[in-house]
């Protein structure tokens, strides 16, 4: 007679994935969620990565989104059986990593939560006041047996409490959100097991959407972590980097230092086509000047996630809006609000628009220009209705002014 427990045991056919002899990958893939943080589209999903260090003491490094808890516990049970987890290291408290916290504390009531002062402030706000805690600080070390964890604080990459955990024996950096990416891990878990072209756009979009507001903090973190002898980077999202660490490190360094390429993003809103025609005229002239990186986006169609990502790539930004009820076109307003929020630096700006009644589009674009403080390359251009010769010539001048600025660099 086969018992229920034996049946369940035979059903659990999980493949163990190891980063080293004693360190296991416990991540899961989310292909159901449409919007990360309920804001950012993730058409290719996202992975929530968690890790288990099995030594004289057992430590879990970050957790997963709570919807995946059953498989998560199955994986842990298969690896450690009846042993208890001694420590839960919380590098980052956002719920995509702390979502399983309450369930873990129910399963392992004696577990010690490891975090810094701000970590415990956030646990208090989100969940409860834990009693078994170990509060750590910069360079604090936690001995597990053969393995030693060295904690380093990297605030604002991506929350104030964010820290990383460096395992000294293996050189594995558990980096939290830093060096992460959108995109599920479809079979391949490590960088040498995947086609990195897939992660080119998804890692950049992840950085610009999630961490991009905190570029100076990211720069500080990159400099700080250089003192560690890092052999592997295990982030909370995206592939684990064990072969070409420079692939992700160099990109995070480039993006967070606003190292922009020659190119232009042209954003417009258009109800009847007049503002769109103005955008096309500008783009054509910029192309005539030999600039190949030109992306035109309709604000009513393209999500700000993708536009923000391109603004961390290209130096030029030209925005056009019709007046809408004497104000800015709402969908243009949405994108501009996102840009103001993320505040990327070092751009050249051009503005144009259209109206029929008494204006409001360009007037508000000027307000945007004052707030964002990017260099305005030409006077704002506003047409009334269909594009005519004099304004056509002005648009050509705007395009040339932008091209001049970009090409003189
Ligand atoms: Fe992946 Fe900021 O949480």
Image: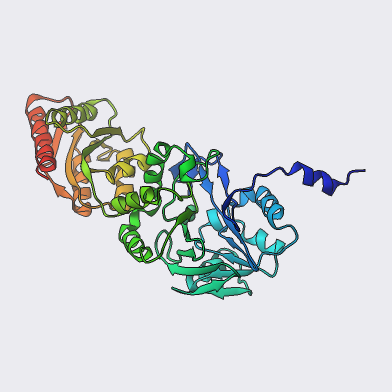
Nearest the viewer among 21 and 204 is: 21
* Residue depicted at 38% across the width and 44% down the height: 205
- Looking at the picture, how far across and down is residue 196, in whole percent? 41, 39
Q: Quadrant of residue 32?
A: top right
Classify residue 389 as left or right of residue 301: left
How many circles with numbers are drawn on the protein? 0
Scheme by which the image is coloured: rainbow
Residue 157, image x, y percentages: 40, 59
User: On the rendered structure, is 128 left or right of 8?
Assistant: left
Image position, residue 109 (x, y; %)? 70, 67
- Say which of 359 and 196 sits in front: 196
In the image, residue 172 sits, relative to residue 205, either above or below, namely: below
Q: The C terminus lies in which quarter of the figure?
A: top left
Q: Position of residue 197 (x, y in %)?
A: 39, 37
Relative horizontal placement of residue 31, taking residue 56 as reference (left or right): left
**In the picture shown, does residue 392 fall above or below 227?**
above
Res. 406 in view: yes
Does residue 378 appear anywhere in the picture? Answer: no
Residue 108: name its quadrant: bottom right
Give the residue drawn at x 32%, y 63%. Answer: 223
- The quarter of the picture where the N terminus appears is top right
């Amino acid at each position: 007679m086969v018992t229920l427990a034996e049946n369940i045991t035979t059903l659990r056919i999980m493949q163990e994935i190891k980063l080293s002899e004693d360190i296991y990958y416990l991540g899961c893939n989310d292909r159901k969620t449409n919007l990360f943080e309920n804001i950012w589209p993730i058409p290719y999903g996202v992975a929530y990565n968690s890790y288990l260090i099995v030594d004289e003491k057992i430590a879990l490094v970050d957790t997963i989104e709570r919807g995946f808890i059953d498989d998560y516990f199955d994986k842990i049970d298969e690896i450690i059986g009846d042993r208890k987890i001694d420590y839960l290291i919380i590098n980052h408290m956002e719920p995509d990593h702390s979502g399983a916290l309450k369930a873990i504390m129910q399963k392992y009531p004696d577990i010690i939560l490891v975090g810094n002062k701000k970590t415990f402030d956030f646990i208090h706000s989100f969940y409860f006041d834990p009693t078994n805690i170990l509060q750590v600080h910069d360079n604090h070390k936690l001995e597990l047996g053969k393995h030693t964890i060295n904690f380093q604080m990297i605030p604002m990459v991506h929350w104030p409490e964010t820290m990383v955990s460096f395992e000294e024996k293996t050189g594995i950096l558990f980096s939290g959100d830093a060096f992460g990416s959108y995109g599920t891990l479809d079979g391949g878990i490590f960088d040498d097991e995947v086609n990195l072209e897939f992660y080119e756009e998804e890692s950049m979009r992840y950085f610009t959407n999630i961490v991009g507001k905190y570029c100076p903090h990211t720069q500080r973190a990159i400099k700080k972590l250089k003192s560690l002898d890092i052999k592997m980077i295990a982030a909370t999202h995206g592939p684990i980097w064990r072969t070409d660490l420079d692939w992700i490190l160099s990109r995070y360094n480039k993006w967070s230092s606003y190292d922009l390429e020659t190119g232009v993003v042209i954003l417009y809103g258009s109800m009847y086509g007049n503002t769109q025609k103005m955008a096309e005229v500008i783009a054509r002239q910029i192309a005539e000047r030999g600039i190949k990186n030109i992306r035109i986006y309709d604000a009513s169609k393209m999500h700000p996630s993708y536009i923000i990502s391109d603004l961390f790539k290209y130096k030029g930004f030209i925005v056009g809006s019709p007046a809408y009820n004497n104000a800015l076109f709402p969908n243009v307003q949405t994108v501009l609000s996102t840009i103001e929020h993320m505040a990327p630096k070092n751009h050249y700006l051009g503005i144009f628009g259209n109206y029929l009644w008494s204006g409001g589009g360009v007037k508000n674009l000027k307000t945007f220009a004052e707030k964002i403080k990017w260099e305005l390359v030409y006077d704002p251009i506003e047409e009334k209705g269909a594009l005519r010769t004099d304004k056509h010539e002005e648009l050509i001048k705007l395009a040339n002014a932008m091209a001049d600025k970009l090409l003189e660099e």
